[in-house]
Amino acid sequence: MPFDLLLKKTEIDCFMKLVVLFIWLSVSNLVLAQKQDTITIYYKIDESSIQKIQHCKLDSVVKVLKDSASIKVAIYGYSDHSGTDQYNLNLTDARAKKVETYLLNKGINPNAISLCIGKGKVQSKGTNDKLLSEPLHRKVELILIKAQDSPTNKNTSISPVLADSTSIVIRMRNLNIGDSLVLNNINFEPASSVILKESIKPLKELLKVLLESPTLKIEIQGHTDCTPAFEKARILSTDRARTICDFLIRNGINSNRLQYIGYGNSRPIIKAITEEAGLKNRRVEIKIIDK
């Protein structure tokens, strides 16, 4: 779709999205905690500046965040397939950061932004998708998620068998090729690949290990609990593992040192559908491939 036609389409879509958001907010107390909505803004090629035509969408997000303290937003930047991987990561990071700045300048509490990251080029499902939808790949997605009211969303409910940031470094250094380490303190929004803000610290510890050990290669393995259907769980766990991989690449780790895979709910630690089992089964593991 030509970009000019895309902009005309977004003019109509902008108002409709605003209406839908207000309706969604009004009933948010009645929906499941996993409920989320995605607002998308688009860009011209190689640009990170926000087009004025996109402001109404961002202003609708501002309205939602100001009206409800229980809703948070994660900001993800994307690009099309032109340019090198590093260029696309830098470009998408700039797009995401400018959206974050826009929201903050409108008075949004920084704590309402759970994550802001550039993810590089969109992973196309096929050649036709790439050719037909490239303008739609130049975008930022704002994922609005209603926080859980249940205790499972509070730090006190996280499994006590959590490695602190120092032990992640120490334990990874002591692993041999083929060994795995469960990173229980890297967590995500429910039914989402959005990383919780408190997970950034352990991710930086993982990054530190990789930066200090330039020959170290790892596989990032995503796992879910037993609740989702198998295929849905596999896709979700893969998205979560890919998000961690993208974070490491964006911060200087060569992609040749990283692999990722999602096992869904096929490898539970505890084969039961309980809250305790879910906390242990929803995990990320790091497997040592080479040292």
Image (cartoon, rainbow, N blue to C red):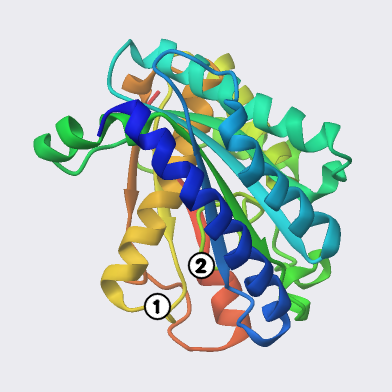
Residue at (56, 20) in percent of width and height: 251
Total count of labels = 2
Q: Reply above or below: 17 against 224.
A: above
Mark 1: amino acid: Pro
- Position of residue 152 in the picture relative to residue 75 (left or right): right
For disc 1, the neighbor class at 10 Å (few under 14, some 14 to 19, many from 20) is: some
Badge 1 element: loop
Q: Is residue 61 left or right of residue 53?
A: right
Quarter of the picture holding the C terminus:
top left
The answer to whether residue 113 is above or below residue 205 is below
Inter-mark Cα distance, 1 to 2: 9 Å
**Residue displayed at 76% across by 28% down:** 101
Write down the residue under mark 2. 191
| Image quadrant where residue 21 sits | bottom right
Reading the chain from its start, which is encountered first: label 1 or label 2?
Answer: 2
Residues marked 1 and 2 touching at CB (< 8 Å): yes
Q: Is residue 81 visible?
A: yes
Q: Position of residue 206 (x, y in %)?
A: 60, 33
Q: Amino acid at mark 2?
A: Ala
The answer to whether residue 155 is above or below residue 51 is: below
x and y percentages locating residue 188 in the rendered image? 59, 57
Determine which residue is flagged by label 1.
228
